Structure formats: C-alpha cells, structure tokens
Image (tube, helix red, strand yellow):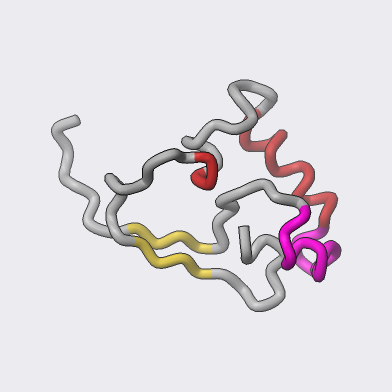
Amino acid sequence: RGGPAICAQVLMYPGLDRDMGAASMVAMPDAPLLSREDIDYMPELADRGVGAPHDAYRIPAYAVDLSGLPPGIVVTGECDPIRDW
C-alpha cells in the first residue's frame, strides 16, 4: 500500500491456533497466569462475535499460504498452555 516493506516479525506469546486439545493445553489447563477460562474468553474478546471463526487473519494456523510473510521469531514460555498452538 505504498508503505515500507516489513522485513521481520517478532511474535511474543502468540495465539496462532485455537486447538483446545493441543498437548500444552491438556498438560497445563490452569496455568497460574493463563487459565482455561481466560483462553476460552480470548476469541470473544478478539472477534466480538463478528466474522468467520476460521479466519486466517485472526488465526494464522488457518491460512492456506504464508509464503508472503517476512521471516519471524516466535517466543513462547515453558509453562504456557498455548505454546504449541
């Protein structure tokens, strides 16, 4: 859109999927700073009930092609229930 090209991205504790059956979610459903209840509320907070639930702009795991994105670094915590999303 005429702006500078994005050369890199840093994703800090990102929610890249909504798989509540992921291994880290099963192992740590009630982590001290991020409970299952908090995680259940996140889509409502982000989406406000608008749009498709599998929108790739909201949840990158649903994207068909990510090849146009710049290189990225993903940072997660060891005891993060959404670390393997």
In the image, residue 9 lies in the stretch drawn in magenta: no
Across and down, in percent, residue 85 comes to 62, 57
Tally the marks: 0
Residue 46 higher or lower than 84, as above or below = above
The residue shown at (78%, 45%) is 40
The residue shown at (65%, 78%) is 78
Camera-side residue of 29 and 68: 68
The residue shown at (81%, 59%) is 35
Across and down, in percent, residue 50 comes to 63, 21
Q: Looking at this rendering, what residue extends furthest in the bottom direction?
A: 78
Rendering quarter of residue 28: bottom right
Camera-side residue of 37 and 23: 23
Read off the magenta span.
21-35
Which quarter shows the N terminus?
A: top left
The residue shown at (67%, 61%) is 82
Residue 83 higher or lower than 21, as above or below = below
Q: Looking at this rendering, what residue extends furthest in the top direction?
A: 50
Across and down, in percent, residue 56 comes to 50, 36
Q: Looking at this rendering, what residue extends furthest in the front direction?
A: 64
Rendering quarter of residue 30: bottom right
Across and down, in percent, residue 59 comes to 55, 42
In the image, residue 31 lies in the stretch drawn in magenta: yes
